[in-house]
Image (spheres, rainbow, N blue to C red):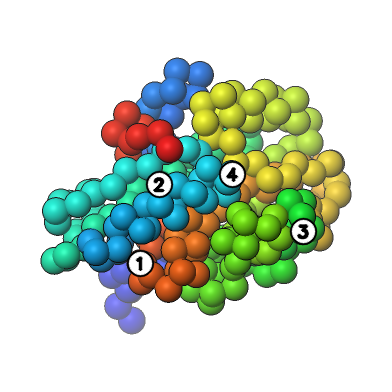
Amino acid sequence: MTPATNPIIFAISRIENMMYQVTFDPSKGSGVIAANVSIIRDSDLNDALLIFKGVMKSGLGVGSYIRAIRDQESFGNIRLGRRECAIITPCSITIDSVLLKSGVSVRPIFGGIVQIKKGVPVRFTDILTYDSTTIDPIDALMSQELTSVTDVGSTGSGKILANVRVVPMHARERVEGVLETLKSANFDSILFVGEPNTEVLGVPIERDHIGIVAIGGTNPMAAVQEQGIPIRTQALSELIDIDEMEMV
């Protein structure tokens, strides 16, 4: 039997490869970050940008950076069609990479939907593990239209996209220091940090580890979708220098 020329690549493999390519240093505010790409019609760009920025200002995105690409430019492997534009935003893999390069053994394990009540994360209602799917779990869940990001932004209650990674429990002090540095660099997207050997928002975490829940980078895209604006999202897709983006 002839081997497949295009072997199946699980999401976790793409995540790990991208983690090693990120060079962002939050203490300097410079370097390359992992990015999500959203493609929309040029006629929807202004409305979409308003929604994106509103979601990010509400603390429901990853970081406070954005870039719009117009005029059928190309960006990395992304090619825009006629009358299409792209919006580039940070991906939470950037956080994992910074932890890794700070000496923390970090392992992303799943993405899912988190229920929020009055601004407080309550539980995961749906999850997909990174080692069991070839597509990004957040993309898959977003396509099912399970979110209510707009409601969370306006009322504090609803459902948003989030993801979880685990770190050794003895790394907690170092993790907290790294997360503070990321926060000072406008990457304040941590939703919940668990305790050793305990569940995170209703999901069991392996022994001697801590679960860290980060807000999904595709929540702005989900909010655009909720408003009936057609949008195509390509998560885990590109790298971009932070200097090429603008602050929200």
Name which residue type carries label 1: Arg
Q: CA distance from mark 2 to mark 3?
A: 26 Å
Point out the image quarter for the N terminus. Answer: bottom left
Q: Secondary structure at mark 2?
A: strand
Going 83% across and 53% down the picture, which residue do you hit? 199
Residue at the disc numbered 3: 117
Question: Mark 2 sits on what residue?
Answer: 89
> With respect to residue 244, does 1 lie above or below?
below
Query: Going 68% across and 64% down the picture, which residue do you hit?
Result: 158
Judge whether 147 appears above or below 99 on screen: below
**Which residue type does callout 4 highlight?**
Gly
Q: Residue at x 24, y 64 (%)?
A: 43
- Identify residue type, mark 3: Lys
Q: Position of residue 6 (x, y in %)?
A: 31, 68
Q: Position of residue 47 (x, y in %)?
A: 36, 58
Label 2 or label 3, whichever lies nearer to me, is 3
What SS does tag 1 mark? strand
Q: Nearer the viewer, residue 92 or 150?
A: 150
Label 1–label 2 contact, CB within 8 A: no
Along the viewing direction, whichever of 82 and 153 lies nearer the viewer: 153
Residue that numbered label 4 is attached to: 59
Disc 4 packing (10 Å; few <14; some 14–19; many ≥20): some
Q: CA distance from mark 4 to mark 3?
A: 15 Å
